[in-house]
Amino acid sequence: MAKTTVERPVEDDIQSKELLSSYRLMLLIRRLEESVYRKFHEAKIGGYLHRYDGMEALVAGIIPFLQIPGDYVLSTYRDHAHALACGTSPRAVMAELMGRATGCAGGKGGSMHLIDPENGFLGGDGIVGGPVPISLGVGYALKYRGNGNVCVVYFGDGAMNQGGVHEAMNMIGLYRLPVLFILENNKYAMGTSVERSTGQTDFVLKAKAHGIDGEHVDGMDLLKVRDVAGRAIKKMRETCEPYFLEMSCYRYVGHGIGDDNTKAWTTYRTEDEVAQWRERDPLLRTGDYLEARGILTPELIEKFEAEIAAEVEDAIEFAEASAEPPLDSLYENVYSK
Amino acid sequence: MATMRYQQALRLAMTEEMERDPNVFLCGEEVGQYQGTYRVSEGMLQKFGPKRVVDTPISEIGIAGLATGAAMVGLRPIAEFMTWSFALEAMDQLVNHAAKITYMSGGRIQCPVVFRGPAGVGTQLSAQHSQSMESWYAHTPGFKVVMPAFPDDAKGLLKTAIRENNPIIFMEHAGLYGLQGEVPEDPDFTVPFGVAAVRRVGTDITLVSYSRGVHLCLKAADVLAKEGIECEVIDLRTLVPLDMETVVTSVRKTHHAVVAQEEWKNVSFGSELSARIHEMAFDDLDAPVGRVGGADVPMPYAKNLERAAIPTENDVIAAVRRALA
Ligand SMILES: Cc1ncc(C[n+]2csc(CCOP(=O)(O)OP(=O)(O)O)c2C)c(N)n1
Ligand SMILES: [Mg+2]
């Protein structure tokens, strides 16, 4: 494609703006994720730490379609991207990773438990499959109120083997609830490949078995993700029906920082395989597409990079300068007042 | 004797028992190809093959059912939970099935299964991953509950567990996996259930604990000894069956007791221990039994809050001072 700025219809302009902002969001997620291992090794971040590198399109191509307040997002422990996409500030994310009072969970949650209800984010979940039964209840409440809102629930290929997930899917299919399932099929659950964990590797078929329609999507192609999710959400608002998207994607780094530290990931995949998936990188592909259409330029990329580097640095400085939670907050919020 | 880590001692126990009895097999998440989340089963898939070292999906109900059902018809499974926090998914298979089938079948069905994996709190794993729930299982008739504090016990108790004809809850401590100790290499070495170990002899107060709590008590005893307070430290090793005789004998001598645990304090194993000491040795006590336990909150992530929520040797020392005051 030649780089032209030929006249485009208005719709195209909106689309370009949205794509550019999704691109920038993906870049922010990538750069923030790249900073967190360093902070872990400096002992500023503790506990478990799971990154989203390679999977950015799954949030950047979906969450911007949501109406917040009103719609809700639930995700797994691999949740930094979901919080950022919902609108949690990098400062509040980083401060939470460092266990500071200014974090989005007041320092009580950490990496796996980012949460920001005011921005529609009902939280990460440390339990594999845990968010799916919760999405059933959220979906029920949304249908109950009847405002055309939807609940988007993210979960992994490994989570699909949890009993609770299937109970919830069955009931969501039965009650026809507005839940959008985003199956993050990154091919592995820790060290176990999809082929080694299920006798039916087509996840859409499993959804269909529960009466929920769905489709397969290349989850590393931002445009495809946007296209499919945009249509699905629009339709769900009218029909109040569930929908299931199996997103093919890949995580570039180990399952969590432990996996990377011990190089345990070499027991289940090769560097070659990782390199091959990196060639399909959503940032690269979206960047190429936008550049070819003259929407993105090397100068603009540079500008984004500089802004984002400053944003991430600012988040780190803010977090490091923030106080730990006060000791007397230990017993706070065990119960509601 | 050989020096090895707690984690290696567990592997040795499983390996020896699998060599001894072809009915023993291991199943769980990442136990095989990945070599174990905490490396407990490292090399076992290579040694025993996929029929006896079974990688499962992330399906705790399935794992518990696989092990329980196989045990009911004569195999002797070892089921690993990646951590005991995830065993919550399997509660029904465990409590309503594994624990009860012998009773419900009038003794005609045995259920020789070991459920094992890391328990314990710490390392900023926060609310859903950092908790200890031994009293849930000790509360349930039908389970025997084992919580080793040292590498030799890890081996000897696990071997006993595998040879037992009952469902065993075997709770390791993730924070002890790296602990080194002398471990007998004799394949006939086992440690019996229901026999507590006196880890330190003392005259002034009895400290009762298990798992990592024993190490807190030993550290506290070291500190207090410098002030002339001599603590007797008892390691229960198994919560069910419970060796009250060793505990009561000690309390009759010291007239004081503190019980210590990592799990939440409210309605906990320490509550049971304290009640039994009061029931069995009331007249020998010079002070109420002191209790040390985790703060009754979901575990917070922030370092300072986590530190405040987890019991330390200082909490044991403070409890001893209160009891002796
Ligand atoms: C019920 C439960 N079992 C086991 C675990 C340990 N665990 C955490 S993440 C994970 C792998 C999950 O894989 P998948 O669902 O594919 O998500 P991904 O990590 O690939 O994003 C496992 C086994 C857990 N957190 N919860
Ligand atoms: Mg996965």
Image (tube, coloured by chain):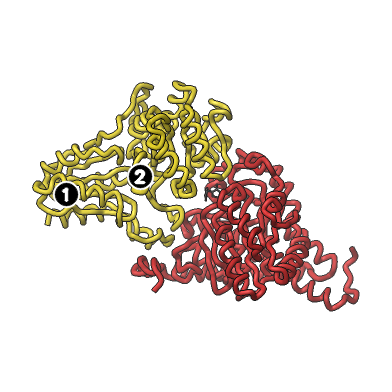
Chain colours: A red, B yellow
Quarter of the picture holding the N terminus of chain B: top left
| Tag of residue B241 | none
Residue B57 % position (x, y): 58, 42
Q: Position of residue B84 (x, y in %)?
A: 44, 46
Residue B172: which quarter of the image?
top left
Furthest toward the bottom, the residue is A10
Q: Please tell me how crowded label 2 is: few (under 14), some (14-19), or many (20+) other residues with Cα within 10 Å.
A: some
Q: Is residue B3 visible?
A: no
Q: Chain of mark 1?
A: B
Q: Is residue A325 left or right of residue B278?
A: right
Tell me which chain the residue with mark 2 is part of.
B
Q: Nearer the viewer, residue B305 or A203?
A: A203
Residue at 40 percent across and 39 percent down: it is B100
Q: Who is closer to the viewer here, A280 or B270?
A: B270
A207 is higher (above) or lower (below) than A301: above
Name the kind of residue labelled 2 in the image: Thr
- Judging by the rendered image, the residue that carries numbered circle 2 is B140
Residue at the spot 43% in from the left edge and 25% down from the top edge? B17
Dot 1 falls on a residue whose secondary structure is helix
Give the quadrant of the C terminus of chain B. bottom left
Alpha carbon separation for disc pair 1 and 2 = 22 Å
Vertical side of A103 occupied by B207: above or below: above
Q: Which residue is the site of mark 1?
A: B278
Residue B22 drawn at (x, y percent): 49, 22
The image quarter in which residue A80 lies? bottom right
User: From the Cβ of disc 2, is ligand 1 less than 8 Å away?
Assistant: no
For marks 1 and 2 on the same chain, the one whose residue lies earlier in the sequence: 2
Q: Amino acid at mark 1?
A: His
> Do the residues at discs 1 and 2 belong to one chain?
yes
Q: Secondary structure at mark 2?
A: loop
